[in-house]
Image (cartoon, grey):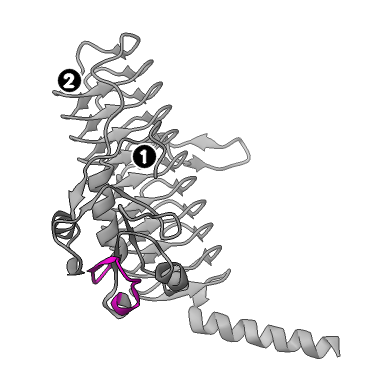
Amino acid sequence: MADPRFFSVRGPFTLARLADISGAELVVGDVERTVFDVAALEAAGPEDLSFLDNKLYLEAFTGSAAGACIVGAEHRERAPAGMAVLVAEDPYRSYALAARAFYPEEAEGRGIHESAVVDGSARLDEDVVIGAGVVIGAGAEIGRACGIGAGTVIGPRVVIGEETSIGAGASVSHAIIGARVLLHPGVRIGQRGFGFAMGRKGHLKVPQLGRVIIEDDVEVGANSTIDRGSGPDTVIGAGSMIDNLVQIGHNVRLGRGCVIVAQAGVAGSTQLGDYVALAAQAGLVGHLKIGAGAQIAAQSGVMRDVPAGAIVCGSPAVPLKQFFRQTAVVSRLAKKRGT
């Protein structure tokens, strides 16, 4: 059970209702049976819902005391006696939908804190929650049901769409942000890009005249940074998920549904197609084109374009099969040297 000091549980829900919410099919169990919470397989009790989406946890599933579980069709027959079974094509996604019903995201506090500084020309829509010490600049527009955490600074003329949530200590400038966006604490959006005319007389800053455009349903993790464009905009496509400590350079364009994991970096003017995935600590040089659906392995250094659907690994990054062949050759050479 989640700690009630930090999380408020909703419900309970019948199995029929959970099946409807999650998109799973109830194949074993009484539709009127009631479930009160969600929990991991090892911790779940008779009134809890759990899930199985990885065969590594099959033993935990067969020994679980969970009252109900969402599983793939291939595991339905392994459920212990007394467990209600909901079958889903994607158990983890179905579980996420159910868990969100038990624990919906809610903005903390109510209204505008007395210590917030809101410029008189800023426009705040209804049901906004503005935390302590927030600063909102001239001409900014904050959409309906937005929440802005303590100490955050929203720059002049920034536009924020409805139901967007911004964590504590963030800063946003030169940006147009869509609806249902989640910016975690410490995020920096819209600061000047890293642009200089280099020379022996000193490095001369080049004006950065673009914006950051964040489309709907994007999440940006804690202490990640997204620079504004130098002329063209920096664009984060709808539904993209960016982890903590990620750097996005000026003029970068992400397609829809991209995933960028912690400590990855994308240098200026690189373009990512739809549903590209960058694993942790991957680094991309500037001015590249990464095709739709491509996957970049952890700690890879990408120095040339990657075609759509490709999987690359290593530094410099190469196709995955080539990387494994290279690794095998090096391993054999090392063994020969050791004899």
The residue to which callout 2 is attached is: 123
Q: What element carries label 1?
A: loop
Horizontal arrangement in the rendering, residue 15 relative to residue 253 (left or right): left
The residue most toward the front is: 82
What is the magenta range? 76-90
Question: Counting residues from the N terminus, which is met first, the one under dot 2 or under dot 1?
Answer: 2
| Residue occupying the point 40% across, 68% down | 61
Where 208 sits versus 137, above or below?
below
Instruction: State the image coordinates of residue 120 (x, y, percent, origin top left).
Output: 21, 10
- Which residue: 18% across, 67% down? 26
User: Dividing the picture into quarters, in which one does residue 65 lie?
Assistant: bottom left
Instruction: Find out whether residue 293 is within the magenta segment.
Output: no
* Other residues around mark 2 within 10 Å, as few (<14) / some (14–19) / many (≥20): some
SS for callout 2: strand
Amino acid type, mark 1 = Arg
Picture quarter with the N terminus:
top left
Q: What residue is disc 1 on?
A: 228
